[in-house]
């Protein structure tokens, strides 16, 4: 669904330190946010270039809303702050494998994993003003690179990945500070194109909730 203007004073700057994400695996933290020690897996090798690798036998896990866990073999070593419209995509040396997407509404960050390796991360828009983004575990129901909304006046939804029968989807958007969506997840257009190419129908998408009062 298309994005619509709204001023909610959310801090646009999201501090992305690869070491912090590697230790907490709870999404990149906003400035001043305390790490959430969901796992205690240390880094067994120093960060190397654009990626942090975990040693075999010491892979951390991410817990999903349905109780399942996903193994994490490496994460992107993002050391610069990301703003609205920012993203990173790097699949160098990453083999083919199952793809899943983790969306953290609290931090407005989407992460893409393939075979346990994070290959993409982007700042997102999500739904507010009575059109909240649903949370939980979903699968990609439909892909359409040139989709238009039938609900919101044929508004473009490029590189659409549908998650629900009523039209909530991930799609390319103009990701700007003070904007929101009608429930969809909006990502930068160039990122949406890459995600569309990597994801498949049936792939898992997990959406974690925003704090009370933000959605």
Image (cartoon, grey):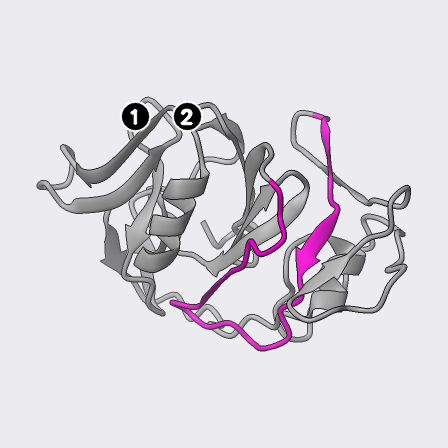
At a point 59% along the width and 44% down the height, the residue shown is 113
Q: Is residue 143 left or right of residue 146?
A: right
Q: Which residue is mark 1?
A: 166
At a point 60% along the width and 34% down the height, the residue shown is 97
Residue 201, numbered circle = 2
Q: Is residue 34 magenta?
A: no
Locate residue 163: give its quadrant: top left
Element at badge 1? loop
How far, Cα to Cα, is label 2 from label 1?
Answer: 17 Å
Locate residue 100: give its quadrant: top right
Out of 90 and 160, give the one closest to the viewer: 90
Residue 157 x/y as whole percent: 23, 44
Out of 33 and 44, give the one closest to the viewer: 44
Magenta stretch bounds = 67-95
Tell me whether circle 2 and circle 1 mark residues in contact (CB < 8 Å).
Answer: no
The dominant secondary structure in magenta is loop
Out of 207 and 20, give the one closest to the viewer: 20
* Quarter of the image where the N terminus is located: top left
Q: Is residue 29 left or right of residue 143?
A: right
Residue 73 x/y as whole percent: 75, 46
At a point 31% along the width and 57% down the height, the residue shown is 189
Q: Is residue 58 left or right of residue 202?
A: right
Q: Is residue 173 left or right of residue 136?
A: left
Quick check: can you spot residue 207?
Answer: no
Element at badge 2? loop
Residue 49 x/y as whole percent: 68, 71
Quick check: can you spot residue 73?
Answer: yes
Circle nearer the viewer, 2 or 1: 2
């Amino acid at each position: 669904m298309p994005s619509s203007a709204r001023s909610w004073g959310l801090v646009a700057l999201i501090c992305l330190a690869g070491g912090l994400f590697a230790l907490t695996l709870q999404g990149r933290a906003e400035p001043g946010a305390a790490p959430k020690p969901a796992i205690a897996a240390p880094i067994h090798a120093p960060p190397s270039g654009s990626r942090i690798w975990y040693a075999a036998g010491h892979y951390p896990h991410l817990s999903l809303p349905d109780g399942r866990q996903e193994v994490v073999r490496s994460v992107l070593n993002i050391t610069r702050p990301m703003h609205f419209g920012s993203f990173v995509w790097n699949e160098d040396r990453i083999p083919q494998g199952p793809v899943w997407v983790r969306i953290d509404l609290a931090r407005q960050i989407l992460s893409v994993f393939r075979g346990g390796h994070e290959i993409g991360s982007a700042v997102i828009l999500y739904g507010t003003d009575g059109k909240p983004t649903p949370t939980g575990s979903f699968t990609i129901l439909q892909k359409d690179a040139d989709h238009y909304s039938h609900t919101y006046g044929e508004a473009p939804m490029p590189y659409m990945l549908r998650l629900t029968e009523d039209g909530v989807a991930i799609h390319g958007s103009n990701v700007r500070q003070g904007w929101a969506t009608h429930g969809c997840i909006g990502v930068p257009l160039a990122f949406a194109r890459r995600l569309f190419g990597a994801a498949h129908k049936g792939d898992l998408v997990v959406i974690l909730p925003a704090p009370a009062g933000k959605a």
